[in-house]
Amino acid sequence: MERFGELLTASLDVTMRQIFGESASELIISLVERQRSVKREEAGKNIEAFHACVSRLVGSEIAQIILVASLKKLCAEVQREYEQVESYFSFLDALYEIKFKLLAPSPNESVLCAIDGS
């Protein structure tokens, strides 16, 4: 669950920078840190307090837009990571399949071994 909080924090940070720009988002985040004692790194873990404070600073509608956009970005990131893991496991499956084909005796070899008596 800690990884989820980190991903959500990163998503919130990127989204705020896209909406407000670098300096304005830094100002908002520093105000949130002072008013609510929610550190930037913990925004994803304490999303309710972060959202409440941002709502007071920029309005509830804009705060809701930030949250929805951040969650969409988070979903895209999780999907991308899932696809990377899935392709990695597909690659491993293909390697194991090749390995077993190379290690398993072919039907012709087993017939020859039976004929030779070995």
Image (tube, grey):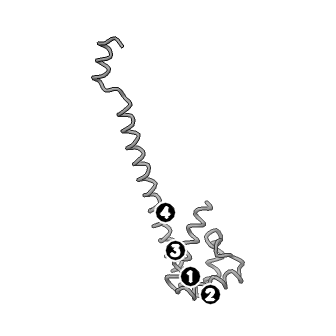
* Quarter of the view holding residue 49: bottom right
Q: Looking at the picture, how far across and down is residue 21, in whole percent?
A: 52, 86
User: Label 3 neighbourhood size at 10 Å, few (<14), some (14-19), many (20+)?
Assistant: many
Task: Kindly identify which numbered label has been placed on residue 27.
Answer: 2
Image point (55%, 85%), residue name: 22
Look at label 1 and name its amino acid: Ala
Comparing 65 with 93, the one in front is 93
* 4 or 2: tag closer to the N-terminus: 2
Residue at which label 1 appears: 63
Q: Looking at the picture, how far across and down is residue 108, in whole percent?
A: 27, 23
Comparing 83 with 108, the one in front is 108
Task: Kindly identify which numbered label has been placed on residue 80.
Answer: none
* Quarter of the view holding residue 92: top left
Look at label 2 and name its amino acid: Leu
Q: Are marks 2 and 3 in contact (CB under 8 Å)?
A: no
Query: Above or below — where is 118 with respect to 59?
Result: above
* Cα distance between the residues tagged 1 and 3: 10 Å
Residue at which label 3 appears: 70
Instruction: Please state if 40 lies on the left or on the right of 68 as rendered.
Output: right
Frontmost of labels 1 and 3 is: 3
* Cα distance between the residues tagged 4 and 1: 22 Å
